[in-house]
Amino acid sequence: MDTPPSSTDDRSRRRYLSSLVGAVGALSLAGCAADDATDSDPPSTSASTPTGTPSAGSTDRPAVGDVVEGDRLAMVAYSVGRSADFETLEVLNGDGHVVVDVAVKNTHDSEYVGLSYHGGFTLRDGESREYGATVVGPTPRLHAGELAPGEVARGFVTFDRVPPDATGLTLEVTPTTEPSGAGTATITLESDGTGRTLTHDFAVPVHELGEPTEYEDTRFTATEVRTSTGGDTARPAPGNEFVIVDFTVENTGSDELFLNHVLQATLKDSEGRTYDFSPTAVRTIDNGAVSMTVAPGNRERAELGFELETGIEPLYLVMDLDDVWVGGRRFYQLR
């Protein structure tokens, strides 16, 4: 289901973009729930011919706020900010940064779609110069990886070494793994369009707490969830809370099973923002660890810790039980 932009969306965007120093020209998403707009002149050239709502200033390419949809992928750039510096970032070579709040959704009903933060996003200016994404920038950073059918990923994509006087900026998004033919979406970042907020519409099972799920030699069960304000060892930042997930994992195979919680466990809200495993939260719980090894035939219990804004719901646990994140992604609704 795709919904109009919410007040939570607006508060989050203001909070994250406030970390930009000297940001200019932030383009906001105008609320529009309609998703049946058509285009007589498709705005992108690709195998799947994505279409979107045209902006007022552009007749051939979607703008900030326009949802671009193809056979396997939908995307929207909610806002764009430019700055000469960040509070915690030293500018490289005197050049600036462009930060785009992006959401990408796998619209296929049965197949995963791969999207890499580094290889899937390209920023171009009016002189055809290209800029790649950098991991340094405001959070939450976009985490895509292998998106399950109906899943959304949302976050900031930051590009560095962009000359402050660069104009004619466009964002190009291309899936980077199979299946091929997912197409390329291109959005102009200097026009303001209309659109809607992308939300999950899962075409894969979303499990309840206590319900086991299996993948190859792994049987995983998220059993309980609780919140915490921390203790003597650590506390969340003001306005945040620790979310603690109790789980069990059983090794049903003949080889040792290794889980890296930092890489394999995340939380997601309804719009696809990702909240990573928090070593700070782990310090406040007795049975927390950043990784675990399970011997063949054994079952282990442990807890996962995350830090995020207080009261976010719905909230999902995402476990990637496959090393390459293809087909092994499992979802639990925590609240």
Image (cartoon, helix red, strand yellow):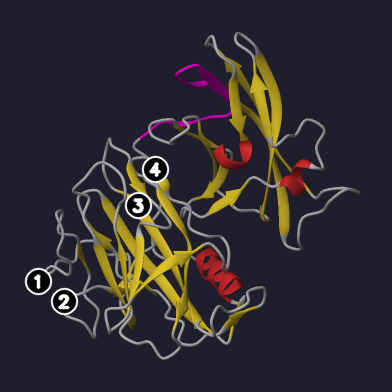
Mark closer to the observer (4, 2): 4
- Where the C terminus falls, by quadrant? top right
Amino acid type, callout 3:
Lys
Q: Nearer the viewer, residue 63 or 291?
A: 291
Helix, strand or loop at mark 3: strand
Amino acid type, callout 2:
Asp
Q: Residue furthest bottom?
A: 165
The magenta stretch is 204-221
Please give left or right for residue 141 compared with residue 283 in the image: left
The residue at which mark 4 appears reads as 146
Vertical placement of residue 63 versus 177, above or below: below
Helix, strand or loop at mark 4: strand
- Quadrant location of residue 266? top right
In the rendered image, is residue 61 in sight?
yes
Could you tell me how far apart the alpha carbons at marks 1 and 2 are, in whole angstroms?
6 Å
Q: Are marks 4 and 2 in contact (CB under 8 Å)?
A: no
Could you tell me how far apart the alpha carbons at marks 4 and 2 are, in whole angstroms?
30 Å
Amino acid type, callout 4:
Glu
The residue at which mark 3 appears reads as 105
Vertical placement of residue 278 versus 320, above or below: below
Mark closer to the observer (1, 4): 4
Q: Nearer the viewer, residue 176 or 108?
A: 176
Q: Earlier in the sequence, mark 2 or mark 3?
A: 2
Badge 3 density bin: few <14, some 14–19, many ≥20, Cα 10 Å: many
Residue visible at 67% across and 27% down in the picture = 292
Q: Which mark is residue 41?
A: 1
Does the segment drawn in magenta span residue 217?
A: yes
